[in-house]
Image (tube, helix red, strand yellow):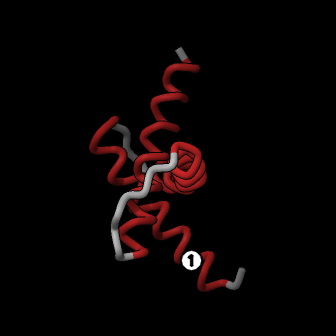
Amino acid sequence: MDARNIVIALVIGLVAGWLASFVVGGSGLIRYLISGVIGSFVGSFLLSKAGINLGIGNEIARDIITATIGAIIVVLLARFIAG
């Protein structure tokens, strides 16, 4: 993985975390980044295990939506565990 791919992954994670904050609340650039990057792994894992294909042709849009779904799950799970 080169530097360009890392930057793209971080930007996708940042956007996904920001979008997830509209659904579940929260703020802060670092929180957006962390929830989005972790959410991208969670979202892609869960969608592939469930056999769900989003049917979106644009790869970046598909990655952002997948990461957003995962980020929402990550934030809700963290809140559930925290209390």
- Name, please, the residue furthest toward the front: 51
Q: Position of residue 39 (x, y in %)?
A: 53, 49
Quadrant assignment for the N terminus: bottom right
Can I make out residue 35 in this image?
Answer: no
Residue visible at 49% across and 25% down in the picture: 79
Residue 26: give x, y in percent of width and height.
37, 39
Q: Is residue 12 above or below residue 20?
A: below
> Compared to 11, does 4 lie above or below?
below
The image quarter containing residue 81 is top right
Depth check: give the residue in front, 53 or 3.
Answer: 53
Q: Please name the residue that numbered disc 1 is placed on.
A: 7
The vertical placement of 37 against 63, above or below, is above
Q: Residue furthest right?
A: 1
Q: Which residue is located at x 66 percent, y 84 percent?
A: 3
Which residue: 36% across, 76% down? 58
Kind of residue sitting beneath label 1: Val
Percent position of residue 54, x then y: 37, 58
Kind of element beneath mark 1: helix
Which residue of the protein is positioned furthest toward the top in this rendering? 83
Q: Is residue 8 left or right of residue 66?
A: right
Q: From the viewer's perspective, is 83 left or right of 2? A: left
Residue drawn at point x = 42 percent, y = 57 percent: 53
Front residue of 40 and 34? 40
Which residue appears farthest toward the left when viewing the image?
22
- Using the rendered image of the protein, determine whether residue 68 is visible from the camera's viewpoint: yes
Q: Nearer the viewer, residue 73 or 3?
A: 73
Query: 71 or 31, which lies in front?
Result: 71
Q: Residues within 10 Å of mark 1 (few under 14, many from 20)?
A: few
